[in-house]
Amino acid sequence: MTKAAIPESWCCIDCGVNAAPGLSTRAEFKNAVAAGVLRVDDGVTQEITEWSEVYTVRESVWKAAGMKPWGGCLCIGCIEKRLGRKLKPKDFKRGDPFNGMPGTPRLMERRQQCET
């Protein structure tokens, strides 16, 4: 598992909202593995729901928001505040699995026809 595979926290670094309430943080995942609780055959639940704001934007958009790669999470409201505008479908990274998953109404509206 690489450091970038699971973020340190799924909480927005600006407002603190948990952008992925159904997913484990890096520490939780490591602790589960160390305790022998997390194995492929255990059926450990990780879910992205309509309460999630898990997404990937293009590197240029992330940088414009003042973010470094794997520098934390931003909810949709906070990334838009940093950018000074609403996200558009073209802002989302094409082909990224996160961009084809469920999410909050505002995330779904911004992604609209985002190709995966």
Image (cartoon, grey):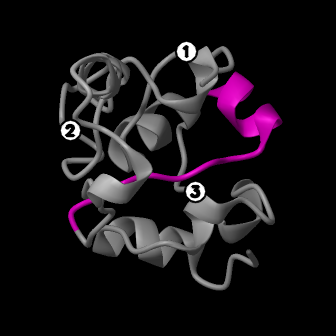
Q: Are marks 1 and 3 in contact (CB under 8 Å)?
A: no
- CA gap, disc 2 to disc 3? 19 Å
Tag 2 residue? 18
Tag 2, which secondary structure? loop
At 60% from the left edge and 25% from the top edge, which residue is drawn?
Answer: 1
Over which residues does the magenta segment extend? 51-66
Which label belongs to residue 87? 3
Q: Relative to residue 33, is residue 90 drawn left or right?
A: right
- CA gap, disc 2 to disc 1? 15 Å
The answer to whether residue 33 is above or below residue 79 is above
Bin the neighbour count of mark 2 within 10 Å (Cα to Cα): few under 14, some 14-19, many 20 and up: some
The answer to whether residue 108 is above or below residue 74 is below
- Residue 66 shows in the view: no
At 22% from the left edge and 26% from the top edge, which residue is drawn?
Answer: 15
Q: Are marks 2 and 1 in contact (CB under 8 Å)?
A: no
- Residue 14 point in image, percent of width and height: 30, 21
Query: Which of marks 3 and 2 precedes in the sequence?
Result: 2
- Residue 45 point in image, percent of width and height: 25, 58
The answer to whether residue 86 is above or below residue 31 is below
Tag 1, which secondary structure? loop
At 35% from the left edge and 19% from the top edge, which residue is drawn?
Answer: 30
In the image, residue 65 lies in the stretch drawn in magenta: yes
Which label belongs to residue 71? 1
The three-letter amino acid code for the residue at tag 2 is Asn
